[in-house]
Amino acid sequence: MKFDLRLDGKIAIITGGAMGLGKGIASGLAALGARVVIADVNEEIGRESRNEIVANGGKADFHTVDVTNAEQFQKMVEEIAEQYNRIDILVNNAGIAAKTNCIDMRVEDWQRIIDINLTGSWIGSRAVAPVMMKQRSGKIINMCSMFGFVALPGLTAYAASKGGISQLTKALALELVEYNIQVNAIAPAYIATELTNNARSDPERLEDILRRTPIKRLGSIEEVVGPIIFLASDLSNFMIGHTMLVDGGWTSW
Ligand SMILES: NC(=O)c1ccc[n+]([C@@H]2O[C@H](COP(=O)([O-])OP(=O)(O)OC[C@H]3O[C@@H](n4cnc5c(N)ncnc54)[C@H](O)[C@@H]3O)[C@@H](O)[C@H]2O)c1
């Protein structure tokens, strides 16, 4: 039996790859030989992250892309396909969160979360799918959350967007399976990134998070990157439509 995790020669797009989990995912895929394309709205940090990967011996590009802008995404995909003649991996990672009671939430705030987290993942998948269909291979990995399965008060839009990701993953997987494209998702619990700063810096919320987590700590970026590498590699070729919980046991109680 031979297991190969190497991604040499593969082209991978990581949305929201400028910082946090996306940056970790880009670094991890690059370390295994993939050429990574960081697609992010934050040009300054995105370019810094790209340079860091290159300084560490990886292959990386940066594109300024807002995942809610279908034209911008499409243009990037055309440029990458033209330049490298293929796209092997798309990680739909870009996402935002906000903690607001549903009655206090403005329609614009709800819409923004759904647009970036859910619609953005569909826009990205729709853009890369024709390239992957033509080459008859590909991996699309969506960033869900344990809040796609369970909820807490104040997370209506976020939880709804992530629940949608889990279903989007199944529906896309069924449409693309015949082209040898595997679509899966990953659902982490609280990880120490910018996105969870507010939750982590409030002692009461942090205590509540730790009480609810059987493993009694937050996850690290590396602990999310590992499962992503598995889903991006040939080791997961028989998996489709699956959302993998990486939650320290939060949903196991
Ligand atoms: N951190 C966690 O605890 C956690 C847990 C579960 C799921 N997630 C999910 O993981 C993903 C990444 O989270 P993170 O913690 O790294 O967040 P983060 O805030 O640290 O980074 C998010 C990145 O996405 C980019 N981004 C935001 N809006 C964008 C847009 N419209 N177009 C392109 N890029 C955009 C930001 O510029 C940033 O680089 C999100 O989808 C989030 O919901 C995070």
Image: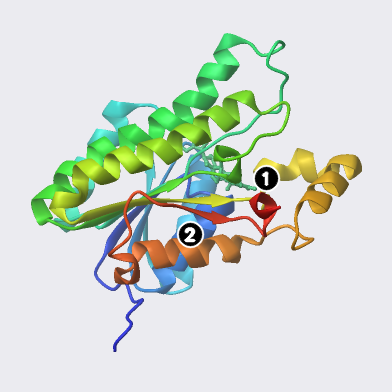
Residue at point 55%, 53% (across, down): 21
Q: Secondary structure at mark 2?
A: helix
Find residue 194 and name its label: 1
In the picture shown, does residue 2 fall above or below 16?
Answer: below
Q: Residues within 10 Å of mark 1 (few under 14, many from 20)?
A: few
Q: Residue at x 48, y 64 (%)?
A: 227
- Vertical arrangement, residue 25 with respect to residue 241, above or below: below
Q: Residue furthest left?
A: 134
The residue closer to the viewer here, 167 or 141, is: 167
Q: Which mark is residue 176?
A: none
* Residue behind label 1 places its C-beta within 8 angstroms of ligand 1: yes
Q: Quadrant of residue 118?
A: top left
Q: Is residue 87 left or right of residue 23?
A: left
Q: Position of residue 27 (x, y in %)?
A: 48, 64
Q: Which residue is mark 2?
A: 25
Question: Residue lying farthest right?
Answer: 203
Of pointers 1 and 2, the one earlier in the residue sequence: 2
Q: CA distance from mark 1 to mark 2?
A: 15 Å
Q: Residue at x 66, y 28 (%)?
A: 155
Which amino acid does the dot numbered 1 rest on? Glu
**Other residues around mark 2 within 10 Å, as few (<14) / some (14–19) / many (≥20):** many
Residue 186 visible somewhere in the drawing: yes
Residue 132 in the figure: left or right of residue 161: left
Which amino acid, mark 2?
A: Ile
